[in-house]
Amino acid sequence: MTEQVTPDFEKSELIPVIVQDARTRQVLMLAYTNEEAYAKMLETGETWFYSRSRQKLWHKGEASGHFQKVREMRLDCDSDTLLVLVEQTGAACHTGAYSCFFNEVKGYEGNDNRSIFHDLEDQIEDRRVNPKEKSYTNYLLDQGIDKVLKKVGEESSEVIIASKNPDNDELLGEVDDLLYHLMVLLNIRGLTLEDVACKARARHEVEGNKKEFHTRTEF
């Protein structure tokens, strides 16, 4: 039997807790916990922290109703930092933002354009939690899955039409529109880009396997 690891409260009475959305993997907040709050987290299945400003235990959501249901907990290599993956109700930040980390100090600089899709995924989730007036994303979310499916069908047709034309910029624009609506669809169904990546990884992990290839192409 593997020995259960626990935070090293002998090293420090308070240890930092990084709270992350279990579904999207977005970092939501940073707080601190002590041994008593940690025990309550294990007991209740919800996040408990120690408020350094109020000098007392803090059950996240007790005042706002924005509770955090614990889905997974991990310790770092030194057992002095805790990572908690949660199912977030409402917004994590006291400002009303879904995540506390919304102040950009330095934007992403690099060639990995995949980050824009994760940013868009986070924005769609934020619109779901914090609706904004005249937001097209909120319009789609309010209309529901049938409206989104209709748009996916329309954008798919636009991609096909644009593919027959020589203008690659037009094609890229239509593909971008299709991807956006697919991401809204994923959000409605409670799925993420990470879920899509896991499915793709599972399908391709046996490279050169004829049986797997036929299984994928039968539909």
Image (cartoon, rainbow, N blue to C red):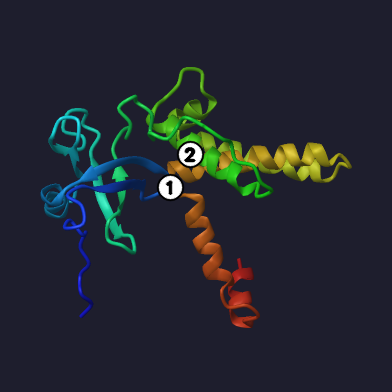
User: The N terminus is located in which quarter?
Assistant: bottom left
Find numbered disc 1 in the image and state the secondary structure of the residue it sits on. Answer: loop
The residue furthest top is 133
State the residue at coordinates (28%, 47%): 16
Given the image, on which type of amino acid does mark 2 rest?
A: Asp
Asked where in the image residue 48 lies, by quadrant, the reply is top left
Residue situated in front as seen by the camera: 160 or 171 = 171
Residue contact between numbered discs 1 and 2, judged by CB atoms under 8 Å: yes
Q: Label 1 to label 2, Cα distance in Å? A: 8 Å
Q: Name the residue under label 2.
A: 122
Residue drawn at the location 62% of the way across and 43% of the way down: 179
Tell which of 49 and 173 is nearer to you. Answer: 49
For the C terminus, which image quadrant? Answer: bottom right
User: Which circle's residue, 1 or 2, is located before the other in the chain?
Assistant: 1
**In the figure, 79 relative to 23: above or below?**
below
29 over 205 or under it: above or below: above
Horizontal and vertical percent for residue 75? 29, 60
Q: Nearer the viewer, residue 156 or 98?
A: 98
Q: What residue type is labelled 1?
A: Thr
Taking depth in this image into account, of 113 and 144 the one nearest to the observer is 113
Is 32 drawn above or below residue 201 in the view shown? Answer: above
Mark 2 surroundings within 10 Å by alpha-carbon count, few (fewer than 14), some (14 through 19), many (20 or more) = some
**Helix, strand or loop for disc 2:** helix
Residue at image mark 1? 24
| Residue displayed at 70% across by 42% down | 175
Disc on res. 186: none
Bin the neighbour count of mark 1 within 10 Å (Cα to Cα): few under 14, some 14-19, many 20 and up: many
Q: Where is residue 61 in the image (x, y as percent from the top left)?
A: 21, 34
User: Which residue sits furthest right?
Assistant: 166
Residue 18 position in % (x across, y down) = 33, 47
Please tell me which residue is depicted at 36% across the width and 47% down the height of the picture.
Answer: 20
Q: Where is residue 202 in the image (x, y as percent from the top left)?
A: 52, 69
